[in-house]
Image (cartoon, helix red, strand yellow):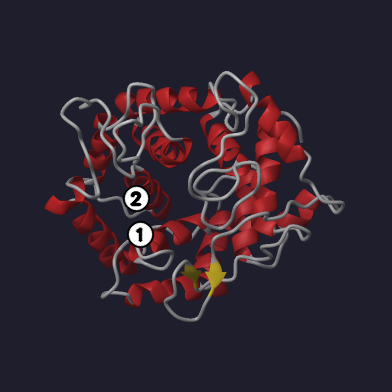
Amino acid sequence: MTLTDTLCAHADPVVAYRARRRLAGESERSPAMRRLRRNIGASAMARDLLRGLNLERWSPYRKWQGPHWTLYSLAEIGYPPGDRRLFPLRQRVLEWMFSPAFLKPPSTAIYPDQPERPRRCASMEGNAIWSQLELGIVDESRVPLLADRLLAMQWPDGGWNCDKRRGARTSSVQETLIPLRGLAAWHRATGDKRSGAGARRAAEFLLQRRLLWRKGNDALIVPEWGGPVNQIHYPIRFYDVLSALLVMAEMGRVRDPRCRKALDLLEGKRLADGMFPVEWTNVKRAPRIVSRGTYADWGPLQKKKGNLLVTIDALYVLREAGRS
């Protein structure tokens, strides 16, 4: 039995659904896949993450257990779509994002001499769009406005940046990948041409840097926050080799020659058993609200032991790149 076969037949529905969706290409509409997804709703991971339903007094962005990240994490595990229990979380996130203060300092800065470079954390809108699509709980009146906001705040070079310093003139790879994913997902779901064009511009910004290296030389990009881009991060992913390649694969761009060096790097991380590890994390499991805590067990978060969910994503990327 191959590693792919083992993952597709795994007893954990989170693992099996992800493997059959990404590696076997099985339709999400098949009876077996629908049954698996329902089973995810009753899984230990889902039960743990649903503890976030009771966090009314916490900020929507509380890392990593507030409503914003609860929806993201549920989307990440393939939680079944259309669960009305998630509507209050969605409501809190959208009320926060559409509050008058959200687009004002200190959250957002627009300098009169640089109106084309609005400074804000566009990953928030990107994750909100992607999560609602994955969870089948799209607010059809407000999510299109989030896509419009991302397009309005896209910098001339195709990316986004939250750097409030006036000297910042180039987008940030970290602040570009997640809104790119959100716009690309919105385009696939709705056919919105403006979102598709915006996603392609953002992808080009990253591809010009071969995803991980500074434009014009071979120096690895070293972000001011977050982990090393040449290591695999999980479960919260802002920017790293696997997350960047995953988004390129979802867009059908991973066979672009400019992805080759990143693909070589990813292939080199395969362990002797064929699995892929988590090399860096800013998450810790906790039974209560703590900074950067999570209620769920996301599997091994260590360099020398393979992680099932990360392995599925890595194998999917390599398959889409023609390197299976």
Amino acid type, residue under disc 1 in the picture = His
Task: Tell me if mark 2 has few (under 14), some (14-19) or many (20+) residues whose alpha carbon lies within 10 angstroms of its own.
Answer: many
Identify the element where label 1 is drawn: helix
Describe residue 62's horizontal placement relative to residue 253 as left or right: left
Residue 265 % position (x, y): 72, 36
Contact check, label 1 and label 2, Cβ < 8 Å: yes
Residue 16 % position (x, y): 65, 58
Amino acid type, residue under disc 2 in the picture = Ala
Q: Residue at x 74, y 32 (%)?
A: 264
Q: Residue at x 65, y 19 (%)?
A: 257
* Residue on which the image places disc 2: 128
Q: Residue at x 50, y 81 (%)?
A: 287
* Residue on which the image places disc 1: 68
Identify the element where label 2 is drawn: helix
Residue 103 % position (x, y): 19, 45
Quick one: which residue is furthest to the bottom in this view? 287
Describe residue 294's horizontal placement relative to residue 317 as left or right: left
Quick one: which residue is furthest to the left in this view? 100
